[in-house]
Structure formats: structure tokens, C-alpha cells
Image: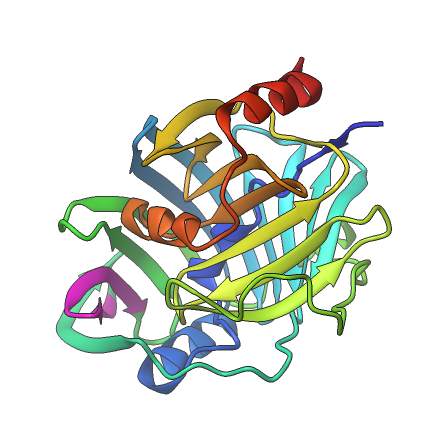
Amino acid sequence: MRRTLTLVTLISLVVMAPSPALAGELDDLLERSGQAAYTAEQTISCSTPDGARDAVVRIVQDGPQLSVTSTADEGSEVLSGAGDWSLRRGEGVVSRASVKSTGNTAAPVYEVERVGPIVFLDRAAMRYRLNRDGVQRAELTFDLHTGTLVASTTFNADGSPYCRRRLVSFEPGVPELTAAEQAPPSGVEPVDTDLGLPEVVAGFQRLDQYRDEEGIGFSYFSDGFFSFAAFEARSEVVLPGGALVRIGDAVYSRVSSPGQVTYAWPTASGVMALVGDMPVDLQEAVLAELPPPSDPGIFRKVWRTLFG
């Protein structure tokens, strides 16, 4: 039985919620945003190597309880609560887990620069820049009264914008979350055994590891702002809509979606997949430090097995 990779829309939440690895002023800003209560509509616009990727989503947040629903696909939504997340389609929960840091903490890699006050959606707001290794990586705008992250732009290393997110409507206050908008109990728990991936990948620290009942291993990494999940499986993993791309001497299957990217590739021991929200150059840096794809002949053979 084929196992479909259905986590393609989960990591887009990272830019809207704090990470366990954050420290300092950035931690304070994102933690306050993560505790806000509001209902909003957000536009997402990304310039990816695969072309423009745009979306409009509805956000309902009451502190740790967060529901993000696509306005284009009413049957799909992402839920997050108290460190848990889940992906629902229709009435069923497709995937769910709980990110709980194993205690690993990383020194902050981002410098926070205050740009100054602005007016956003007729409300007082403050804008900040995030720099990593001397390169601007993000510009964030927070509502001053509620602390909500109301706009963000992330950047590639050459300074070109990667993804823009903006709230186009914003209603502060405690929303009424329906039963469907509340995250269910977590179905996947962290494991103590090492799944074989390094603790640090291209400046991203491993925070947690999981293995589900079907044998798929899952490791969660963050650099304090961007994050990615790496999946390992010996069974088949299907990435719908994947296009073959060459990065350096390696070949991957890639799907770009609003706010994130997914890669899949066969390795000598099985199949790997990566889901992340980082810009293009950081994607390539991370892939360079993960187990590489098998040689092209094996790739073609496994590709036919997985996707026909």
C-alpha cells in the first residue's frame, strides 16, 4: 500500500508561531504573537524556482489554538494547539504530531533590527529586520496593541523577496473556535532513538524526532526563524505533482507551494522527503548536508516504482 506524503502544508505555520529554539528579542516578539487572539484573512505570495505561488487563507487564533483554512480549498485546513499540529481533509485527520523540544537549544543566529513605527490596516505597528550572517532574511511587522505578526517578507541571499505574507483583514479579540477548529490530541510522540540525521544541518538545529506506526521517521529542525521537517522511510512515499529538478549533481522531486517547498528523493537506504519554509539558497544548503540521492539509474528505477 502506498503511503502518501500529506504534510505539504504544515510548515507554513512556522513563520506565524514561535520555535522552541528561539532566544532573545525575536523570541519575545514571536511568543507574544503566538499568544494573540484574532480572526484574519491573509495573502501569501511567493517567487519560487517553479514560478509564482499565491494563496489566500483564513486564520483563527486563540493563543495556542490556531486554525488556518485555505479559502480556495474548503476541504483542507491546518490546526495547531499547545505544540500540536494536524492536517485535516474533510472529516478525517490525515496527519498529526506534537513538536516538543528535546531540550536542545541553539544560540540565536539572527540579529533583530528595529526599523520603526508604521501604520498597518489603520493600526499602529512596528517593523523589524532579521539578519543572519550579515544577510537580511526577513522583515516583520507586528501590531503594537495585540503583538500579532501582521506582515512578513522573507528574502533570498541575493536580497530578492522569497515570500510575502500580509493580513488583509484583522479582527482582534477572542474568536469562537468550533470543534472542527480545535486541534485533536497528538497521534505521534517523540522517540529517544537516533534516526540517523545530524543534530545540526546548515545552521538548523534538530529539535525533535518521531517515528509513526508505519515506520516513517520525522525530524524537526529550526534555525530560530525558518524551519524544516525531514522524513525518512523504507516504504513508498508519494509526492503528488512533483517535478524533477537538478541541484548541483543531484536530482530531486520538488513541489513549491505558497509559503513552503517539499523535496523527495531516493537514498541508498530508502526514501527521504523535506518540507520547509526557508528561502531557495537555504534549501540548497540544507539538501547538501542531508543524505544524497542515489545515482540517476537507481533514481529512475525507484521513481517508476513510486509514481508509475
* Residue sitting at x 32%, y 38%: 45
Residue 48 shows in the view = yes
Query: Can residue 168 be seen here?
Result: no
Residue at the outermost top position: 308
Task: Report x, y in % for residue 1.
Answer: 85, 27
Q: Residue at x 48, y 41 (%)?
A: 57
Asked if the stretch drawn in magenta spans residue 126, the answer is yes
Q: Position of residue 65 (x, y in %)?
A: 64, 65
Image position, residue 70 (x, y; %): 54, 37
Q: Which image quadrant is residue 115 in?
A: bottom left
Which residue shows up at 72% across the image and 62% down it?
210
Q: Position of residue 125 (x, y in %)?
A: 24, 69
What is the tally of numbered marks visible in this picture? 0
- Viewer-side residue, 271 vs 273: 271
Left or right: 30, with 76 as reference point: left
Quarter of the image containing the C terminus? top right
In this view, the residue in front, 299 or 77, is 299
Residue 80 forms part of the magenta stretch: no
Give the magenta part as a residue range: 124-142
- In the depicted view, which residue is nearer to us: 2 or 292? 292
Left or right of 114 on screen, residue 172: right
Above or below — where is 80 with respect to 6? below
Residue 129 vertical placement versus 167 (above, below): below
Q: Residue at x 79, y 60 (%)?
A: 188
Main secondary structure along the magenta-highlighted residues:
strand
